[in-house]
Amino acid sequence: VSVKMVVVASLSLPSPVVFVGESLKARLVVQNTGENIAELAWGGAVLYCHCSFNNAKVVMREVGPKSAPTSMDFAFSPSRSERGLCVFQSKPEILFCKLRLEPGQISTFLVDIPVPMEAPPSHRGENIRYSYKISFGLQRSAPGARVQLLRAALRVLPVIDLLATMRLECGRESPVRSLTDSRLQSDTDPMPTSSPPSREGSVAADDDLMLDNPFLSTDDPVDSTSERERTLAALRALTARHAPDTYSIGARGAVFVRIMVWKSMYRLGEEIPLWLAFADADWSCAQVAVTLECIETIRPEYCLAAETKAFTPMVRRFASCITTRLVSFSIPVPLIASPELHTDEVDVEWRLTFEFVVTARLANVDPRVAVPADVVSWSLPLRLLPANPATIPFRPGARDCEL
């Protein structure tokens, strides 16, 4: 008589997104839907990170001796049938041994697996990808029974040294940066002097930016602030608006535009407001394009190609400015983007690239006449930091498994 078992796995977090250094909590539900008593020999769970890469540009080397070949159907190999290399794997968590279930009985098992700080974060890049999954393995107590795997994907966000970065930013002023020797000093300049109206989700009170006193011990039982709350407080402090920075862009010795940016650090899901004020010069701007780009740099020891960098445009906006002196942009930062991260194999950074179509200033603009133009490009480095994991949508993709 065949006995039918149905295994259902679900993550207990509000969203299957965690920071590096946190613990992943998962739940395994085992139910006997047959009419006879069923018995499982064992059940376990493993968290692992798999690295897939472009074989034409990246070379990866396995660390440590290779294990002896085994039968994949009868051994617990969490990352079997995965392409690439396993760069991190936690110790197996044994959930049960010789589990006996009556017809209709349900058993629930909780798993708590920490993600170490040295583990690489999730990343889906042009040449390298880091994918995290939690794998449940189960085997029936029957001769020749195979190990069944049930996987659920998750996303791990990087955590930089936020406190050290915040101390560095607090001691840094916001000067007016210029790409030319002269700056625009015009009283009739339409550049706004105040920040744009705050949007939902922005910091509105100084109390939200305050961190815990670093001179107080974190072992004090009175302090109930969790590690995630301290991380989120540091992120809010780093990405708060401050005095705007102004950049002057020139062509052929004359400044034709000034760019105002309110901060250099942004969280995933935020918008990057920009103001561009064009000056009265011999050269005028007919069109401007702003692109949010991801720069993926492969370390030289892992790179096979001559070019180690890959540029991936994420968001691109255009504006025609032949008849205006003030242009504003709002560049959204996608939630699916990878924040700034640094691993042994790859570095991920971000920048804004401005492309100006510059022409000689004309008294009358005739669209039927071709006008000679030049393209002026300039890039502004940015830092993209992770957002609150509870606000990032992610589908784990867990499925039922029949034994």
Image: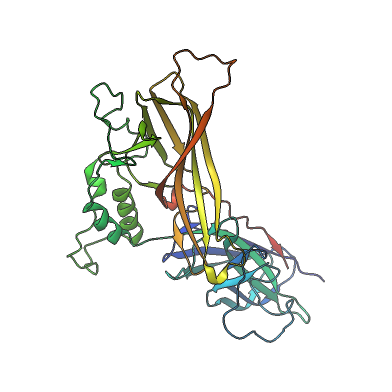
Q: Position of residue 190 (x, y in %)?
A: 31, 23
Residue 179 versus residue 85 in the image, above or below: above
Q: Is residue 269 left or right of residue 227?
A: right
> In this rendering, does residue 191 appear at all?
yes
Residue under the image location 29 percent in, 40 percent down: 181
Residue 332, percent from left and from top? 46, 39
Along the line of sight, which residue is nearer the eye, 359 or 75? 359
Report which quarter residue 35 is drawn in. Answer: bottom right
Q: Relative to 224, is 317 above or below?
A: above
Q: How many numbered discs?
A: 0
Outermost residue, right side: 1
Instruction: Please give the name of the residue rendered at 58% of the width and 67% of the height, measured from the top-left corner.
Output: 303
Q: Looking at the picture, how far across and down is residue 163, in whole percent?
A: 28, 60
Say which of 174 and 188 sits in front.
Answer: 188
Question: What color scheme is it?
Answer: rainbow
Q: Is residue 47 visible?
A: no
Q: Is residue 335 above or below residue 129?
A: above
Q: Quadrant of the C terminus?
A: bottom right
Q: Is residue 1 left or right of residue 178?
A: right
Give the quarter of the figure containing the N terminus: bottom right
* In this view, 226 is above or below 85: above
- Furthest-left residue in this view: 215
Residue 126 sits in quarter: bottom right
Identify which residue, 333 or 203, lies in the foreground. 333
Residue at the (45%, 37%) spot, across then down: 331
Residue 300 is situated, as x and y percent measured from the top left of the image, at 53, 68
